Image (cartoon, rainbow, N blue to C red):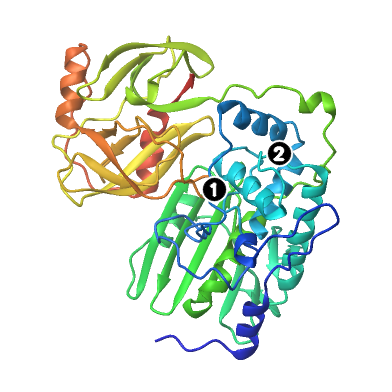
């Protein structure tokens, strides 16, 4: 059983709540529960371990989780007003909302359901119309509450001279600055919380560090893992503690990251602080950051741009992509690599579709596995968007026709590969994007078309993939490097 936190640190965590101070013209929330105004101590339910950090997002109280404004027009108006703001201000609003406990997403500046519901929740706290559009008085109140929450834990953005990163540190809680083996360290007085920054050098790569971070070990369980071209994240726990680690890669190959470890007894208070640290992290900061400017009336009146959907395609041959038919449903037009594309064939029974994309792509197609993946088999899932291919590790569920993975929007059509790199399935479901945390979806079950269905669909369209031969097991990084060139993003305009 973990030992009890020191009285000083426990007191700091317990007292770190936001005071709902109300300026003139804004009605005060009826109760603290309705206000949802705790930053650390009042919401103690642990989140599902499969959610990224980001596994660390908190559930919103019933008083906050109210419906969106009725009607598409109201949602469109809220989106248009938000997107008319400068990017810096959009990010600032999301960051402020996260400190009130209403928003558990990333500060990307992008508008979505998480942002809309958070703004509405705050408006209900403030006693104003919950239309999703912050007026100047409500925006001022939001900024004040968030500022007080940061002040209570001493949250400061620090430029770390040892690594070059910028990162938020709750200095009132982590009072012992020092050095780490490859960066800087901040610890609580009793050593129960540790934040380290890191710089890694050759011969390590992002992929090899990822494989090391998720390697099984005694008394250590990885609860979430995600590898993308420019970063990876791993979260987990030990018998008495929890951890979160992130490593980012620059275009020139530089590797910088950070890790947080803390006692489980402090999780009810510190989980949300980890979210704030992760949102503040800048691995390769620019020299200057643009200042937020107030929106103009003309900008605020501009209509929202159409929202693009996407899918993942597996390159079969030049100009021919295999994907999921569900991911293309309702698309008015398709593009691949910026060029027009079209649906050449679709089969509802198998859930597969063939996209003709002109002369796009010259990468070698993946080899087709000889059999469906076994129940419980470890597989690698590759999807794509405009930034490139994204890599996930997953396990096949009973029956071999589904897997569990945190697929994001655009994950329909993702390639499922065995540990030798052979194609053994294709995700036929279309991830909805609902429930995303920090832009990443929690682990969910998704149907896949296995080798027999793939072979039959390709044969019906007079196509085939090379058969996989005997091969040794490869690392996640080796599989991604070999197959990613054949994983292509398909854009869909509804």
Question: Relative to the observer, which residue lies in front, 280 or 180?
Answer: 280
Q: Is residue 279 above or below residue 300?
A: below
Q: Quadrant of residue 17?
A: bottom right
Label 2 close to label 1 by CB (< 8 Å)? no
Residue beneath the point at 40% across and 74% down: 238
Q: Give the x, y percent position of residue 128.
A: 72, 47
Residue beneath the point at 59% across and 60% down: 275
Secondary structure of residue under mark 1: loop
Question: Relative to the observer, which residue lies in front, 313 or 9?
Answer: 9
Residue beneath the point at 66% across and 34% down: 78
Q: Give the x, y percent position of residue 106.
A: 60, 49
| Residue 107 is at least partly visible in this image | no
Q: Give the x, y percent position of residue 8.
A: 65, 88
N-term mark: 2 or 1: 1
Position of residue 207 in the picture relative to residue 37 (left or right): left
Position of residue 275 in the picture relative to residue 357 (left or right): right
Q: Kindly report which numbered mark, 2 or 1, lies closer to the viewer in this rendering.
A: 1
Secondary structure of residue under mark 2: loop
Q: Residues within 10 Å of mark 2 (few under 14, many from 20)?
A: many
Q: Is residue 5 above or below residue 428?
A: below
| Residue 351 is at least partly visible in this image | yes
Mark 2 sits on what residue? 133
Residue beneath the point at 46% across and 41% down: 434
Question: Relative to the observer, which residue lies in front, 262 or 121?
Answer: 121
Position of residue 215 in the picture relative to residue 249 (left or right): left
Question: Relative to the observer, which residue lies in front, 148 or 323?
Answer: 148
- Label for residue 218? none
Mark 1 sits on what residue? 66
Position of residue 289 in the picture relative to residue 421 (left or right): right
* CA separation in Å, label 2 and label 1: 16 Å
Q: Give the x, y percent position of residue 413.
A: 34, 29
């Amino acid at each position: 059983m973990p030992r009890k936190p020191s009285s000083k640190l426990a007191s700091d965590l317990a007292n770190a709540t936001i005071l709902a101070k109300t300026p003139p013209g804004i009605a005060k929330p009826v109760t603290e529960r309705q206000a949802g105004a705790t930053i650390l101590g009042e919401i103690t339910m642990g989140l599902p371990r499969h959610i990224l950090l980001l596994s660390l997002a908190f559930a919103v109280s019933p008083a906050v989780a109210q419906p969106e404004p009725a009607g598409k027009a109201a949602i469109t108006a809220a989106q248009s007003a938000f997107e008319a703001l400068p990017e810096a201000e959009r990010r600032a609003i999301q960051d402020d909302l996260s400190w009130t406990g209403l928003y558990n997403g990333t500060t990307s500046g992008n508008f979505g359901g998480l942002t809309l519901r958070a703004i509405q929740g705050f408006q209900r706290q403030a006693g104003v119309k919950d239309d999703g559009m912050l007026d100047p008085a409500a925006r001022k109140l939001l900024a004040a509450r968030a500022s007080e929450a940061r002040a209570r834990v001493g949250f400061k953005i620090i430029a770390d001279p040892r690594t070059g990163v910028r990162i938020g540190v709750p200095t009132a809680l982590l009072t012992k600055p020092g050095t780490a083996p490859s960066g800087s360290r901040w610890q609580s007085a009793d050593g129960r919380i540790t934040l380290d920054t890191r710089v890694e050098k050759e011969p390590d790569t992002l992929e090899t560090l990822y494989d090391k971070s998720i390697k099984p070990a005694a008394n250590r369980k990885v609860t979430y893992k995600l590898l993308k071209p420019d970063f990876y994240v791993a979260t987990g726990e030990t018998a008495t503690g929890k951890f979160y680690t992130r490593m980012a890669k620059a275009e020139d190959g530089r590797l910088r990251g950070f890790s947080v470890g803390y006692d489980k007894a402090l999780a009810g208070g510190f989980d949300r602080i980890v979210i704030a640290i992760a949102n503040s992290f800048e691995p390769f900061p620019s020299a200057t950051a643009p200042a937020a400017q107030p929106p103009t009336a003309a900008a605020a009146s501009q209509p929202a741009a159409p929202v693009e959907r996407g899918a993942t395609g597996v390159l079969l041959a030049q100009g021919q992509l295999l994907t999921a038919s569900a991911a293309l449903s309702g698309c008015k037009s398709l593009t691949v690599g910026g060029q027009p594309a079209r649906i050449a064939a679709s089969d509802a029974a198998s859930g597969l579709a063939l996209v003709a994309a002109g002369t796009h792509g010259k990468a070698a197609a993946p080899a087709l596995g000889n059999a469906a993946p076994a129940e419980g088999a470890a597989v690698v899932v590759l999807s794509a968007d405009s930034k490139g291919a994204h890599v996930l590790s997953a396990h096949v569920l009973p029956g071999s026709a589904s897997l569990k993975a945190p697929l994001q929007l655009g994950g329909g059509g993702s390639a499922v590969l065995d540990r030798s790199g052979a194609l053994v399935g294709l995700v036929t479901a279309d991830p909805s994007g609902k429930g995303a945390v920090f832009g990443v979806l929690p682990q969910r079950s998704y149907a896949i078309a296995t080798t027999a269905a793939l072979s039959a669909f390709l044969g019906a369209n007079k196509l085939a993939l090379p058969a996989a031969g005997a091969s040794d097991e490869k690392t996640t990084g080796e599989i991604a490097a070999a197959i990613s060139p054949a994983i292509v993003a398909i854009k869909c305009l509804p």
